[in-house]
């Protein structure tokens, strides 16, 4: 049986003064040892098991009706591509863990933002799903845009139309949450291309 998992890797991004915890998705086959112990093997992507040793992560646990729970787990004794997993009792109800993809701002690249007659540069995507995203307006303060406002994000030939849902002032600038209304490119392919690039860099760093 194959399980899906998610672990959060602490990464220092050059556009931030602090660390970000970026999610990494993976899968593995299991052999049940006891009620709360599993032997995991055949990891995808290969090599990701080397990041798990003595760390907490989450397992996507399917049950009847195609629904699922997110269960906390702990990895021990990683050796020869195998890992002993201790499954916890705590169930996480927040399924957004598996819906949002986070990135270092510099990995996705800089955007230009247009709102009416206002044009702002140094705009970066922090995380993204098919329906929404979180932006960093580097160096900006609260009041430069407003809740409910419509923004146009441009990166070369890519264009996104976003509705502002909330804003929060941070040390690095203004962080904005928005709903994606329209895009002239395939958002899923954009997310996966940037996510896969991030995972490759991480696995290469830990090889």
Image (spheres, rainbow, N blue to C red):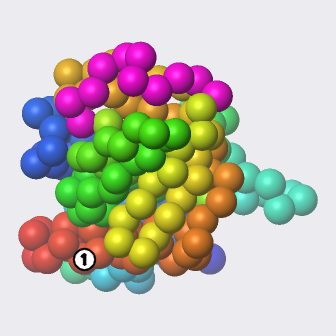
Give yes or no for residue 155 being in the magenta stretch. Answer: no
Q: 2 or 101: nearer the eye?
A: 101
- Which quadrant holds residue 93? top right
**Residue 28, position as x, y percentages in the image:** 47, 74
Question: Is 178 on the left or on the right of 101, as rendered?
Answer: right
Q: 130 or 82: nearer the eye?
A: 130
Height in image: 155 above or below 88? below
Residue found at the very far front of the displayed protein = 117
Q: Total number of numbered labels?
A: 1
Height in image: 136 above or below 194? above
Height in image: 115 above or below 79? above
Q: Say which quadrant the C terminus sits in.
A: bottom left
**Residue 146, position as x, y percentages in the image:** 53, 23
Q: Which residues are magenta?
A: 138-148
The answer to whether residue 195 shows anywhere in this view is yes
Q: 165 or 205: nearer the eye?
A: 165
Residue at 45% from the left image edge and 32% from the top image edge: 176
């Amino acid at each position: 049986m194959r399980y899906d998992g998610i672990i959060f890797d602490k990464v220092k991004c050059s556009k931030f003064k602090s660390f970000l915890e970026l999610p990494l998705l993976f899968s593995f086959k299991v052999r049940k040892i006891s009620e709360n112990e599993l032997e995991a093997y055949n990891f995808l992507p290969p090599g990701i098991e080397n990041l798990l040793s003595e760390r907490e992560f989450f397992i996507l646990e399917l049950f009847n009706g195609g629904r699922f729970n997110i269960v906390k787990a702990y990895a021990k004794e990683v050796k020869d591509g195998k890992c002993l997993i201790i499954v916890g009792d705590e169930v996480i109800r927040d399924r957004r863990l598996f819906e949002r993809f986070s990135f270092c701002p510099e990995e996705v690249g800089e955007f230009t933002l247009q709102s009416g007659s206002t044009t702002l540069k140094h705009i970066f995507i922090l995380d993204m799903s098919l329906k929404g995203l979180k932006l960093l307006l580097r160096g900006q303060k609260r009041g430069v845009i407003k809740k409910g406002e419509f923004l146009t994000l441009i990166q070369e030939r890519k264009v996104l139309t976003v509705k502002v849902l909330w804003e929060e002032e941070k040390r690095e600038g203004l962080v904005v949450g928005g709903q994606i209304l329209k895009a002239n490119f395939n958002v899923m392919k954009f997310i996966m291309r940037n996510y896969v690039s991030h995972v490759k860099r991480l696995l290469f760093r830990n090889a």
